[in-house]
Every structure is written in C-alpha cells, then in structure tokens.
Image: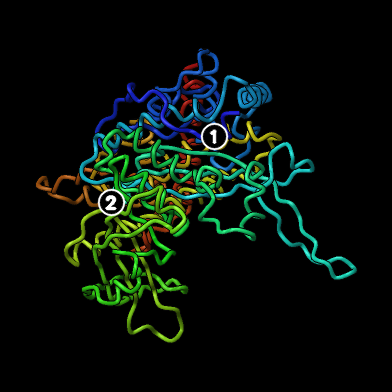
Amino acid sequence: MAWLQGVGMDGTDRVAGMNGADGGLGGMAGTGGGLDDTSAWIQEELSGCDLKDRRLDERLRTLVGDLSARIGQGIPMACQDWSATKAAYRFLDNDKVDEAVILAGHFQATRSRFDAANGPILVLHDTTEFSFKRDRPDAIGKTHKCPVGRDKAGRPVTKTICGILMHSSFVVTPEGLPLGLAAIKFWTRQEFKGITALSKKINMTRIPIEQKESIRWIENLRQSTELLGRPGRCVHIGDRESDIYELFCAAHDAGTHFCVRTCVDRLAESGDTTIAKEMDVAPHGIHMVELADRHGKNITAQLEVRFRQMMILPPIGKQKQYPPLTVTAIHAREINVPEDREPLEWKLLTDVPVATLGQATEKLDWYAMRWKIETFHKILKSGCHAEDAKLRTAQRLANLLAIYCIVSWRIFWLCMINRTSPQSPPSTVFTDVELQLLDHADPKAKRQNSAKRKLSNSASPQSPREPTKTITHYLYAVARLGGYLSRAHDPPPGNKVLWRGFTRLLDLHLGYQLGAKLVGN
C-alpha cells in the first residue's frame, strides 16, 4: 500500500500559480452543503491533484471544503447528510485514492510559495504518533506497548496501542510563515518490530540505516529537497532524533544544508578528540533571549554561545562507508540560572558557515523555529481531532490524515500571516462577502461604528479619512467571533480562536446565502 512507502514529489513540473509568497488564497469557507462554490484556496491547493476520475477530483474538493468549514467535527457532522457522508467513506476507501495523490497538489503549491519567497527557507522535520482505540488493532497497526498495571502475581501488564506514525517535512520562512508540506510518510512499527530486540544485543550504529526507522529522515530530506528544486536555499532542521551521520552525508550529497540538535559527542578532527573537547576552547560570546517560564511569565535568559568549525568523523563501524565532514558546532548554555529551574542548553551542528556571534545566534533562531512543526501537529490533533476518527483501516486513516494536513496548514498559515505580514490586504484571505459580514458581525466594529456615527454628527467637513483596514483588522475580528477578548495586553490570536471564529463566519455566510434566496423567492 502507498502509505507504507511514504509520500514524496509528484509532478513538480506543474507548479500551481500563486500571488506572491503569501498566496492570495481567497476565503476560508467550504462548500457549505452545496450553497457555495469551493473556496479559492481549496482550488489552489488541489489544482495539481489528478485522481484520473473527475468525480473523485470533485469529491476531494468537496471533502476538503467540508472538513475545513467544520474543523474538529467528524465526517458525518462535516458532511451534514447521509448521502455526502457515504460518498466520503467510499472516497477514503477507494483503491485509486492514496495520500500521495491527495497531497500532490499541496506539494506543488508549497513549491510555488517557496519560489515566491526570498532568502533561506527552513524545512522542519519531525515525527508524531496518532493513537486510536480499536477492538481489532491489527487492521490499523501497532505503535507501542504501554504499562497498565500489574496482575495478581505482581507481574507487569501491558496494552498494545494501535495507530499510525507520521513523519512530516514542514516548510517555513525564517520569520515563521508556514509555506506548506514538502514530504510526508505514514507507517506502523510492524515492519521494524525486530529492531528493538536487536538493540539489546548489538551496537545499533552497525546496523545499516536502511533497516531502521531512521531511514525516514533521509527519505524525507531527499524528497523535500527534490520537490523544492533549489537545495542551496534549504536548511533542514531536526531535533536530537535527527542526529544521524547518514543524514549529514545525504544533505552533503544533495547540495543542501542542515541544522540539527545533537545528542552524540562525535569524534572530531584526526580522531583523537571529540566535539565536546573542541568546544571547551572555542570562542564565545553572550546572547540575551526572552522566553516564557513554566508559569507563563516572560523572563530574560543570558546565554553563553560557543561556536567552532571542525571536521567530524563517522561512527567507527562506518568509517569505510562514509567520509569525514566539515561542520560548525554551536553550543549555547544559560549562565546565572535561577535556583528554581534547570539551565537552558542547546548543542547544534550545522554545515552553514558561521564566522561571527551574530551568525551563530541566527542559527539558534532557526532551530527555535522547529517548534512550528509541533504546533502544526497540535492543530492536527487538537483542532481537527484526527485521533477521534472511527475509520477501521490504516489506508483510510492515512487518506483522512492527508486531508487534515491540508486543513491544518491553512489554519496555521492564517495565524502566522497575521503576525508576519500584518499590513497585507484583507483580500489575501477573505472574499468581499466575508469582509462585509465581518464589518457587521464583529462586536468591536459595531461599537466603533456607533461611536463614529455620533462623532460624524458633530464633526466638521474636514474630518480625517478612515484608515485602510488590513488583514490584521479582519483576522482579529474572526478571532473575536471565536472568543478572543482582544484586550490591550493580550498576545495575538492563536490557532484555536481562529478556527472557532472561522466556523462561526461560515455559519454567517450560510445564513447570508439562505436569506438572499428566501428574499429572492
């Protein structure tokens, strides 16, 4: 099945047309139960999909629209009637449908947004797990076993958890604007079940990478680099799980770059020293960062940043197979740490040149962007409620998760476009009808309009013109529909209030359309 093989590039010669780096994707509302045409952004994201059947193409657009319009709802609630629900189930179970075809158009749209952006682009890699409760877990696959207690004899009792693992490659700008997915892979652990047992007997570094789950890091790096087409602009970001020498070599062979958090103290230079020993005498400087502590309070931390270029060697068992590589190690550790918490500490490896403290701290900022992929996975689980799906096979679940990936990217993009490009025109996101609805439905706008009317009654003809409304104005209006209080010191609206607000905006849109039809009759 395709979901066991992973998803890469499919037809990159057909790049979807985009209006600049931000996309110009049109309104958020979905099909609305047949009352409206598919939104412009859905047409844009799916224009590169070809299921070889016009009916399947139309059903995919309808399903993406329904699930994006009713985020967090199950398929029956999103589709609204039995006929549409049954059609959705048949689509997800169709042998012609797999996640590679579903995401092909989105991959091309990601490539287009990548081409329209400037400078280096970060490709974030990470794995997440989707767990499901099933009476027959074998139909989906197993991910791990967890302890549930002990029996009467005191022996530990475990429970097998069924589910799917997903390794995704998420493309963002250095400012944090998500451009979309570039590669994705779904799998279960059945095909790797013997590796854990082997790890207790032999050195895992001597097992070929092709026989381990870690191969997913290399496959996604190659696929995302090939999709984006300009490897020199890509910097692949990974956590400590990506500290794999084969990954560094794959990036070198592909002509692309990496910046990963390291957990291995590798041999360095001629082999008689290590990275840690070299960093003890590396040049250093002081860097101040602001962050939130565990209580949510903003604090300032003082970091000692060390950086040094060096040659690292492959593991001893693989030195005949892989060459030495020249990289820069960056170590950042907090000094003057309060007694109530552990010090911040990051150890990075990158092949991007670093000659100054400013360049070193830039790489720290790049790695900090890795949290964006965690947010993307959170939207999938908490926003789309992907783990609540009742589908019974891995193939159907992988198809549904692929659709949820498109929806989740869109929600995340809406949240971040407000923060990275606040002066963008509102037409980047909203249709004219949606803008009019927000002007009338936003509680704050109502209060402001009332105050303006009072002022206009006593104002002179020389009254100043009303400022042009930006995308930020309307996204805040959507957030207020979702429960955002918009107080003076509140942070910008997040994903949750935005997806709740867009669901309410859809209801307003449907009411507007129904009212127009009723009045017309």
> Which image quadrant is residue 96 in?
top right
The numbered dot on residue 174 is 2
Q: Residue shown at 27%/56% (left/top)?
A: 326
Q: Which residue is mark 1?
A: 67
Residue 317 seen in this snapshot: yes
Q: In front: 366, or 236? A: 236
SS for callout 1: helix
Residue 239 vertical placement versus 231 (above, below): below
Q: In front: 227, or 328? A: 328
Closer to the N terminus: mark 2 or mark 1? 1
Q: Position of residue 21 (x, y in %)?
A: 26, 37
Q: CA distance from mark 2 to mark 1?
A: 30 Å
Inspect the image, locate mark 2, and give the three-letter code of the amino acid beneath it. Pro
Q: Residue furthest front?
A: 320
Left or right of 459? Residue 79 is right
Residue 399 vertical placement versus 257 (above, below): above
Q: Residue shown at 46%/48% (left/top)?
A: 376
Q: Position of residue 293 (x, y in %)?
A: 42, 73
